[in-house]
Amino acid sequence: MSEEIDFLKSLIRVDSSTDNGNETSIAKLIQAKLSESGIESKLIQYAPGRDSLVADLNPDAPGPILGFTGHEDVVNPGDLKEWKHQPFDPFVSGDRLYGRGAADMKAGLAGLVLALIRLKRSGFPYHIRLLATVGEEYGAYGAKQLTELGYVDDISALLVGEGGDHKLKTGHGGSYNYQIISHGKSAHSSTPSHGINAIQKLTNFIIEERHLFDNAPQYPALGPFVHNITIINGGKQINTIPDFAELRGNARPTPTFPNQEITKRFQKLVKKLNNDDHPGTLEFKLIHSFVPVKDNPDSKAINDLSFAVKKVRGIELDREFTNGATDASEFVKSPHKYDIVWYGPTNDGESQAHKVNEYVSIKHYQDAISIYEEFAKRYFSKP
């Protein structure tokens, strides 16, 4: 196997699922790989076992700084019985490399690292900063921390190594996770009047939530506003009136219907239901709020990325604004403004992100390394 495949396999072998919180092992593998080529890096601890990594190629070079970024964590593999091969034991079949995180997004992260090494070996003289983050899949904790520490306050553009390689993403919607807690009063099911059924109160919210966003303004590139209740829990014993129930849901903010407008509607609905004639109390909690990253379809960075894709793959990709949040939702909160673009290796079919038997096309992965390299060269060579 090639150096590129071996390195990607080494990252996939580490169970860095969000539940496991083991990103430090990924950061150290990257650090060792960079060190072999004389690129210094440092670990930024978010929590024990959870380290982001920052590496600067040519840190003393004058002029603009180009950022590369990818996340170290992956989603939980789910039911292991559904996997044809163990999710953290990478397996190659033809052009496919299977494993949890192969597509989302260890191939993109590995590609950014290897592109940085290629640039170093070629004598590339400009400043590139690599940011490898923890916790993107649940909270974007690493990106938030690195933003607060100022690591994107001096960059002129940022390449996020995910988002697919069928179209060039020019911006994306946000992601908004919330919780509704229903408080009631327990009682024996033979005397329900002595209690307050928390599930019934929660059901009232579910019914009204269906049409809560019917008139939400659409963003042309995305169509109707997207929201879903995804988790419901309530009750502990079949013959007891439940005093607690809760649901969790996800919404997708857009530039025309941002995060704060979603919060206002949820809070208004909860207040309304708490003031009606049905007993019990609802409580709204905001879990995560990732903001949209606004569209910039003709920036220098996107044009340079398009040039690099065409040079390596021989095709010109369409540009699109999509749903699906990334670490950019945190990085964009820097007071410093800069261009952001996305490109990550996937395959010739549909996205593999978060799926059982996830895989990445080896060819697309190897092409991505070359595209990242060519993008950096183009970015600095053309005013």
Image (spheres, rainbow, N blue to C red):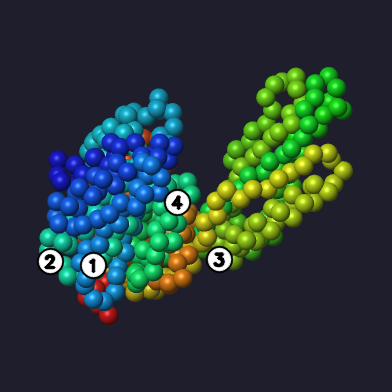
| Helix, strand or loop status at disc 3 | loop
Q: Residue at x 40, y 36 (%)?
A: 20
Q: Nearer the viewer, residue 121 or 285?
A: 285
* Separation of marks 4 and 1 at Cα, in angstroms: 25 Å
* Separation of marks 1 and 3 at Cα, in angstroms: 35 Å
The residue lying furthest to the bottom in this view is 383
* Separation of marks 4 and 3 at Cα, in angstroms: 23 Å
* Separation of marks 2 and 4 at Cα, in angstroms: 34 Å
Seen in the picture, residue 298 relative to 15 is either above or below; the reply is: below
Give, as a three-letter code, the residue at label 3: Pro
Verify CB contact (< 8 Å) between mark 3 and mark 2.
Answer: no
Q: Residue at x 60, y 38 (%)?
A: 231
Q: Residues within 10 Å of mark 4 (few under 14, many from 20)?
A: some
Q: Which mark is residue 255?
A: 3
| Helix, strand or loop status at disc 2 | loop
| Helix, strand or loop status at disc 4 | helix
Does label 3 or label 2 sit earlier along the sequence? 2
Give, as a three-letter code, the residue at label 4: Tyr
Q: Nearer the viewer, residue 241 or 253?
A: 241
Verify CB contact (< 8 Å) between mark 1 and mark 2.
Answer: no
Q: Is residue 62 left or right of residue 261?
A: left
Residue 99 in the image: x percent, y percent? 32, 37
Residue 277 in the image: x percent, y percent? 87, 43
Instruction: Name the residue beneath numbered marker 1.
Output: 59
Instruction: Name the residue beneath numbered marker 2.
Output: 123
Does label 1 or label 2 sit earlier along the sequence? 1
